Image (cartoon, rainbow, N blue to C red):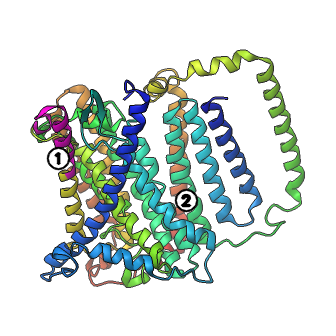
Amino acid sequence: MENLPLSVFILSSIGKILIIVHLLLIGVMAMIWSERRVSGWMQDRLGPNRVGFQGILQPVADGLKFLFKEDLIPNHVDKPLYVLAPAMLLVPALVTVAVVPFGSSITILGHEIPLQIADINIGILYVLAITSLGVYGVVLGAWASNNKYALLGGLRSSAQMISYELTLGLAIIGLLMLTSSLSLREIAKAQGAYPWHWNFLIHFPAFLAFTTAMFAETNRLPFDLAEAEQELVAGYHTEYSSMKFAMFFMAEYMNMIVGSAVTVTLFLGGWHFFGLETMGGPVWSGLISFGIFFVKTGIFLFVFIWVRWTLPRFRYDQLMNLGWKFLLPIALSSIVVTGTLWITTGSRLIVGIGNVVVALIVASIVAGLLAMKAPKPAMQDSDSRVTPTALDAIE
Amino acid sequence: MNAEQILFILFGAVSLIGAISVISFRHPIYSALSLIVTFFAQAGLFLLLGAHFVAAVQVIVYAGAIMVLFLFVIMLLNLGTLSAKGAMGGKLKGFAVILGILLAIEGIYIATNVLNNTAIASAQPATATPNTTTYEIGELLFSKYLLPFEVTSLILLAALIGVIVLVKRESESEN
């Protein structure tokens, strides 16, 4: 990137930014459509199929509806923050994508242009920093709404985000130790062309912990306690309507897309796939690598939808237990195991096996401790019990 | 004036405005938000120095974690607008004035020193090597500053255990 002339650099950057932002926005619409259709398919019904071919224009129709609705601001809200909050959720989701490498590089007119908006050397730290800011949109929107349901949703969300951010950060440290770089492009490059070289096999427990934490950070079901319809009406966006609500909605899907892209880069080999990305000359290889990245992200997004329509929501104490007592010890132990085994043996295979074994041991120890500590009656009727809502947990 | 200086003035101004609004807003939520703005501007200043790692950590730790906890507590206690007197009554005013005067003297001392001694000003850009900061920080932490680093982590661990012990005792006595 440094050896590009300034004019080429600026022009190519503007081009990449325009393409990626539009892809994200179109991706949000595609995600909304596919979520509704996939959920319909999973529940043996049709889902929206009237507007356009197979209902593909449904999100456009929904968007127009949101746009033309009255932009209502209730009287009892804190106006500046109420207006600011949706943007504070949407902007972090949009700017994270700047450091994601979505392909190798394209050579146009003799200039090699990397398919990434900005390759900064602290790439992954930037991603963590910006994702950690997303919570402000939820929390401030909830507080500014001046509504008890919204406030409860915001409180839950802030506690949840802080808890799972730790796992998110710790889970990737083992990976960073082996790659010895923080740049997302370097991390993607360091994973070879074949799936058995990718990070998700070497750091399998960390991969699972990272993905789970990613679900929690995006506020998706099993972890959508911030909006929990049955208890909190709509949670943090109860008071929002029209385009402001649509912005919250878009931010959720945008977070999912960016989260998937980051996971693909970190753990699933980025744009690599059996050497397919090196075929066909300097232009085609870039486009193919972009296509591979696109498909991988799409598959991961399908997993997001799949999980949402398969798993029920966690109870608040279960959520905290999972985050602090299972994911955090697993992520921590993976650091120790990866470091020790890598220095003593230097073999990725042994590191991979050791990670899984130790994670299983840690998880069973924690489960054993929890089973020993839990009072007997609570264990027996924990399935039928509904009383300890998040309200009790917070108080 | 080059781009770097313009950015420095911009970030410095934002950071100062944010810091002033922290104490001038009457509502704790707005004060917390101003503090976040200040942290961001400071991260920008670190970036200008070429300290990318410090800038990122500043945002992750302060803006991303500590301030979320602040907001959580403010919302949980449902703090309203504070009155002009509030908790900081007349007692602490004298103390604050003394500290302010000390801080002002310190600031003037540093400013005059920097203005007189151009060696400090010219030496600054040479120390910033943008592409190696994370590596260098890691190396320094585990060699030259190993003892302070370990002592700091021990202190943090002690604080952590202390908090857990305090909270545990309270919940047991409730039961």
Q: Are marks 1 and 2 in contact (CB under 8 Å)?
A: no
Instruction: Look at the magenta stretch and give its main secondary structure.
Output: helix
Between disc 1 and disc 2, the foreground one is 1
| Quadrant of the snapshot with the N terminus of chain A | top left
In the displayed orientation, state which residue is furthest to the top.
B119
User: Taking A246 as reference, is B70 left or right?
Assistant: right
Q: Of the residues shown, which amino acid type is indicated by label 1?
A: Ile
* Residue in the image at 88% along x and 44% along y: B98
Toward which corner of the image does residue A255 lie, by quadrant? bottom left
Q: Residue A24 at what x, y percent from top left?
A: 33, 57
Q: Residue B13 at what x, y percent from top left?
A: 70, 44
Circle 1 sits on which residue?
A: A292
Toward which corner of the image does residue B58 lie, by quadrant? top right
Q: Residue A128 at what x, y percent from top left?
A: 42, 48
* Residue in the image at 88% along x and 54% along y: B93
Circle 2 sits on which residue?
A: B69
Work out whether residue A209 or residue A224 is closer to the camera in this orientation and state it. Answer: A224
User: Taking A90 as reference, is A381 left or right?
Assistant: left
* Residue in the image at 28% along x and 84% along y: A384
Q: Is residue A281 magenta?
A: yes
| Magenta residue span | A275-294
Say which element carries label 1. Answer: helix
Say which element carries label 2. Answer: helix
In the rendered image, the vertical position of residue A73 relative to residue A133, given as above or below: below
